Amino acid sequence: MRQRYCSESCRAGARKWLRWKAQQRYRRSVGGKQKRNGQNQRYRERVKARELPEPAAVVTENSVRAENAVVPSIREILVVSR
Ligand SMILES: [Zn+2]
């Protein structure tokens, strides 16, 4: 599909615009990819930062549970079996 232009300057202007448009599309795709990568990176860091304290919390919860429930029950078993 070939477009007709009323003058050479219009043709040149259209070509210039098309080149600019292609560049914009390229920049947007590259920039969008970089932006997406940055968002993923930030998301991974946020998840890591959120997940890091959790194991400690789980360990603390387990150790509390162990002190309150598991260890006494083991003592009870030892007492009963004696
Ligand atoms: Zn024109």
Image (spheres, helix red, strand yellow):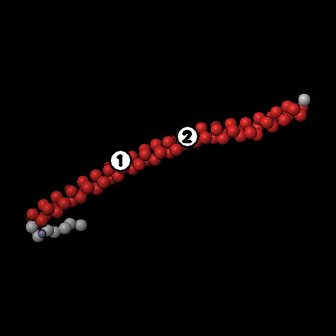
Q: Position of residue 41 (x, y in %)?
A: 43, 44
- Disc 2 on helix, strand or loop? helix
- For this view, does 75 lie left or right of residue 2? right
Q: Amino acid at mark 1?
A: Gln
Mark 2 C-beta closer than 8 Å to ligand 1:
no
Say few, some or many: other residues with alpha carbon within 10 Å of mark 1 (under 14 / 14 to 19 / 20 or more).
few
Between label 2 and label 1, give the one nearer the viewer.
2
Q: Residue at x 89, y 34 (%)?
A: 80
The picture places residue 76, in percent across and down from the top left corner, at: 84, 35
Tag 1 secondary structure = helix
Where does the image place residue 67, in percent across and percent down from the top left? 73, 36
Kindly identify which numbered label has been placed on residue 53. 2
Seen at 14% across and 68% down, the residue is 5
Distance of label 2 from label 1 (alpha carbons): 29 Å
Q: Depth check: 44 or 6 in front?
A: 44
Give the quarter of the figure containing the C terminus.
top right
Please give left or right for residue 51 compared with residue 2 in the image. Answer: right
Q: Residue at x 87, y 32 (%)?
A: 79
Residue at 69% over, 39% down = 64
Q: Residues within 10 Å of mark 2 (few under 14, many from 20)?
A: few
Based on the displayed image, in which of its 4 quarters is residue 25 positioned?
A: bottom left
Residue 23 placement (x, y as % from top left): 24, 54
The image quadrant where one finds ligand 1 is: bottom left
In the rendered structure, which amino acid carries the disc numbered 2? Pro
The numbered mark, 2 or 1, whose residue comes first in the sequence reads: 1
Query: Which numbered dot is residue 34?
Result: 1
